[in-house]
Amino acid sequence: MTRAEDCIFCNIIERHGPADIVYEDRHSIAFLDIYPLNQGHTLVISKKHYATLDEMPPDEVGLLFATVAKVMKGVREAVGADGINIGQSNGKAASQDVFHVHVHIIPRFSQESPEGKTFPGRKKLGKTEMEEIGRKIRSKVQRRS
């Protein structure tokens, strides 16, 4: 697989960096965001290093988003979300912080914003809580595979 030496997501793919992995196949990997907007906030990334989506061949974009669809359903069921936001940023001007293509799956709950017009703030969850959420999501996604 193509990788970038100093990329945190490439390190996660190679198991050199910590992550609560909830799904993996030949092309992509999904893991919990360490500073989630809500419980279950998950990132889906390509196993090949591309800084932005426009660098990816269209067929690989399709494989990535097939994983997003599968994981999204598992996240929603695992945390009992009322809705899901899917987010993907390209470039610094679009607030991309890690320059390895990634897609955010963000569970949303009716009580946080009645019209869903605002995003919740980032949270820092404990290790035990992250592991439990990860187990639930893995279980739900595996049942769909």
Image: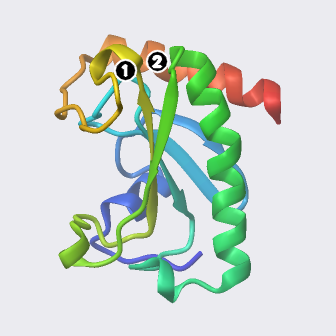
Residue under label 1:
130
Quarter of the picture holding the N terminus: bottom right
Quarter of the picture holding the C terminus: top right
Residue under label 2:
133
Q: Where is residue 139 in the image (x, y as percent from the top left)?
A: 68, 20
Residue 85 against residue 140 in the figure, above or below = below
* Dot 2 and dot 1 residues touching (CB under 8 Å): yes
Residue 49 against residue 111 in the figure, above or below = below
Disc 1 residue type (three-letter) = Met
Residue 14 against residue 82 in the figure, above or below = below
Q: Which residue is drawn at 62% across and 50% down?
A: 68
Quarter where residue 108 is shown: top left
Q: Where is residue 19 in the image (x, y as percent from the top left)?
A: 40, 39
Element on which disc 1 rests: helix
Q: Position of residue 29 (x, y in %)?
A: 58, 51
Quarter where residue 42 is shown: top left
Quarter where residue 120 is shown: top left
Q: How crowded is mark 2: few (under 14 residues within 10 Å), some or many (20 or more)?
A: many
Name the residue furthest front: 115
